[in-house]
Amino acid sequence: MTQSNNIPLGIGLMVLTTFVFSVQDGISRHLAGEYNVLMIVMIRYWFFAAFVISIAARKAGGVGAAARTTQPVLQIVRGVLLSTEICVMVASFTILGLVESHAVFTCYPLLVAALSGPILGEKVGWRRWSAIGVGFVGVLIILQPGIGVFDPAVIIPLIAATMFAVYGLLTRYAARRDTTATSFFWTGVTGAVAMTALGLWAWEPMTQPDWGWMAALCLTGVTGHWLLIKCYEVAEASAVQPFAYLQLVFASVLGIAVFGETVEQNVAIGAGIIVAAGLFTFWRERAQRRTG
């Protein structure tokens, strides 16, 4: 499909995507507070796998064409890594809350920039290295190491951010030989297989109201991914990606309004620095592509 590059529509879709994913995170926080994280993520992946298979079936060549790859090990590693990252992040929601978890997680674009050199062999100039350094000052402000009693739990979303950054870079590496449809297919199916192997052992009875929330979780997950696909179909990623930071805003509003969380001053300041540094790295990457 030829990309139309309708930036206003792309921005609107990205804003809606971040809102839907924030709602999904809020539901995940609720369910994971009551049930085993592995079970919650497993059921979520069942619906995700059904979604990617249904999309593949409608494309030319069907499921067979979508599954065809010359790098199955890489695709499996990607899928397992993402499913593990989701488990870690959902656990973080229950331990730290939405606000602090997302504040730390926003550093993942900086990690992508920092790791793109050793993993993809891309050149990272001094300006982007400076932005990466500034961004991690923001992370340190949030973590506050050496001030009072350091809470090791704040490292959890940082681990999730690192895993998601590596997943993103592996996805870019896989794109050198596989289509987006193939990578998307393997992400859903591999993740579902991995989570089923773990989640069935953690099965717990769920109340009828929470089954309703579970259905809402699956629906928001599928809707969010569908919106994201449409977003990247109508506009270039570099133009709309900065608006993904709105997920921090939406998630924070949910955390405060629904779960009674608070925003500490160090978290607000640190998150602001991280977002500013991340936006600069996006701007530099876009500028280099235009002049390259």
Image (tube, rainbow, N blue to C red):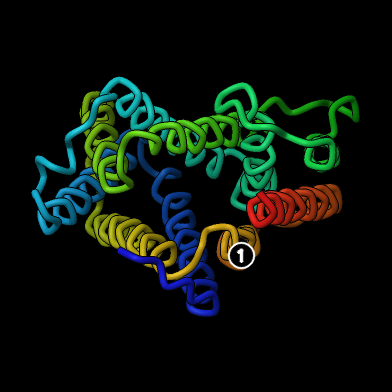
What amino acid is at disc 1? Answer: Phe
Q: Tell me where residue 56 appears, x and y as whole percent.
A: 16, 51
Residue 62 in sight: yes
Q: Is residue 245 left or right of residue 235?
A: right
Residue where numbered disc 1 is placed: 243
**Residue 185, position as x, y percentages in the image:** 24, 43
Q: Is residue 249 left or right of residue 223?
A: right
Q: Would residue 202 be visible to someone looking at this image?
A: no
Question: Which residue is outermost to the right?
Answer: 147
Residue at 22% in and 50% down: 52
157, 277: nearer the viewer: 277
Q: Toward the viewer: 214 or 274?
A: 274
| Of the pair 194 and 43, the residue shown nearer to us | 194
Task: Indicate the quadrant containing the N terminus: top left, top right, bottom left or bottom right.
Answer: bottom left
Q: Is residue 42 left or right of residue 117?
A: left
Q: How many numbered callouts? A: 1
User: Relative to the observer, which residue lies in front, 30 or 275?
Assistant: 275
* Residue at 63% in and 40% down: 108
Q: Position of residue 257 (x, y in %)?
A: 61, 68
Report helix, strand or loop for mark 1: helix
Judged from this view, the residue extending furthest toward the front is 292
The vertical placement of 207 against 127, above or below, is below
Q: Give the crowd class for mark 1: few <14, some 14-19, many >=20 residues within 10 Å.
A: some
Identify the residue shown where x is 85% and y is 52%.
269
Quarter of the figure with residue 141: top right
The residue shown at (39%, 38%) is: 175
| 279 shown above or below 141 | below
Q: Residue at the far bottom: name it.
A: 8
Residue 113's spot in the image, x, y percent? 66, 37
